[in-house]
Amino acid sequence: MSLSRLLPKLTMFAAIALVSMAVTGTASAQSATEIQLSYKDKKFDPAEISAPANTPIVIKLKNLDGKAMEFESKTLKVEKVVAGSTDATINVRAQKPGRYEFFDEYNEKVARGALVVK
Amino acid sequence: MIAALIIVFREVFEAGLIVGIVLAVTRTVPHRNQWIAGGVLAGVLAACVVAAFAGVLSNLFAGMGQEVFNAAILTLAVVMLTWHNVWMARHGKELAGELWAAGKAVVEGSKSLLALAIVVGVAVLREGSEVVLFLYGVLAGGSDSGLSVALGGLAGLILGALVCMLTYFGLVKIPTRALFATTTILIALLAAGMAAQAAAFLEKANWLTALDNVLWDSGWLLSDSSLPGKALHTLIGYTDQPTAMQLAVYVAVLATTFILMRLYGAPPKAAAPAPAE
């Protein structure tokens, strides 16, 4: 009886604690590395880009094609639709060194590139 | 053709799962087919509008329009799912019993159907706009492969509908008594997962920077881009690299659902089944 009354309260406290943790958590303001990338005729230019490890990365992608593409990287956890003849900004969290492949989801086999984090 | 099939199927897969669950949840509610079909139709129309204005949408909020939009519609779905669960905790008995025949219950019931129709619409909209853009790109390209892509896309859609049917028939096999508890838990997990996804979108937009450390990487065990990983991603919000914020939001939504069901649920004697933690 008392447990069933206590349980919701405990859950409530846990929720409040978590939310306040979330609100007070401080953002680490690191300066991001900005990389320019363009896309045309199922090709990324440059096909390989690089960035330093452990800093956030911002990819500025210009879709020079008339139709939409979807920039995707499974390892970078990025998925972004870029309409035809528009630019897009893609925020990537700080990464460990390694090679991270990306591609246009609409042309996955041919339209590929990679981000090398050093 | 196969490429088109895979792309379209990948996008409609998630919507298929969600529609299947909603169909099972509402299986005893009168007029549920119209509501859910309405939700799907509204989702498809909205997907076309979003696809048509993809460029404009993207440029909002300093280039983060897509992320913010996705987070917003996911949040809407979370609220609707949670509201449905709380509503069912109170009215579930009436639904099953004779009280359902009472006019008031029917009116109340359509509120819950509206909530679920919105959830369905959001699911279709999210995945649908990408399908529309893809197919439009291919067809506008004027290549002779247009017909084969259209066929591939159609096959992908049919497979998505199959996922929906399998989910539905799998769920309705569960005996009615257990079904209520099962769908309550399913919907709570679905809502928590969507909330965590909304948090992930806000993180990508840099709107949410607190607690952005990745807690673990279980990609070696189950990648969330594999098909089983994707199914779990939709159903319970599985992510192979969750941030602390995503986990916090996930737990908070589960806790909130639980508390609200207790507070506004059935009177003590009816003892609404509590979701297992």
Image: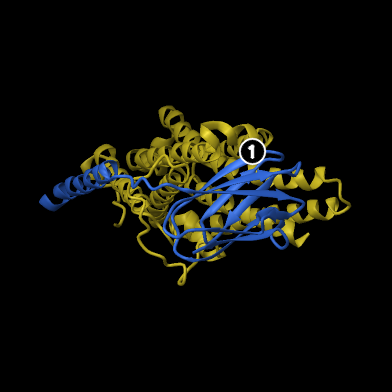
Chain colours: A blue, B yellow
Q: Which residue is mark 1?
A: B47
Image: A115 above or below B100: below
Tell me the subunit letter for badge 1: B
Residue B86 screen position, x and y as percent = 34, 40
Which image quarter holds the C terminus of chain B? bottom left
In the image: residue B83, left or right of residue B234 = left
Residue B66, visible in the rendered structure: yes
Residue at the limit of the structure toward the bottom, as seen here? B221
Residue A2 screen position, x and y as percent = 10, 50
In the image: residue B45, left or right of residue B142 = left
Image: A23 above or below B274: above
Residue B30, visible in the rendered structure: no
Q: In which quadrant of the rendered view does residue B206 lie?
A: top left
Which image quarter holds the N terminus of chain B? bottom right
- Which residue sits at x=40%, y=55%? B182
B169 and A64: which is toward the camera? A64
Q: In which quadrant of the rendered view does residue B50 lie?
A: top right
Image: A106 above or below B261: below
Image: A74 above or below A70: below
B2 and B101: which is toward the camera? B2
B98 and A81: which is toward the camera? A81
In the image: residue B275, left or right of residue B197 = left
Residue at the limit of the structure toward the right, as seen here? B144
Q: Residues within 10 Å of mark 1 (few under 14, many from 20)?
A: many
Mark 1 belongs to which amino acid? Answer: Ala
Residue B16 screen position, x and y as percent = 59, 52
What kind of element bears circle 1?
A: helix
- Which residue sits at x=72%, y=55%? A43
Residue A99 screen position, x and y as percent = 54, 66
- Which residue sits at x=66%, y=44%? A62
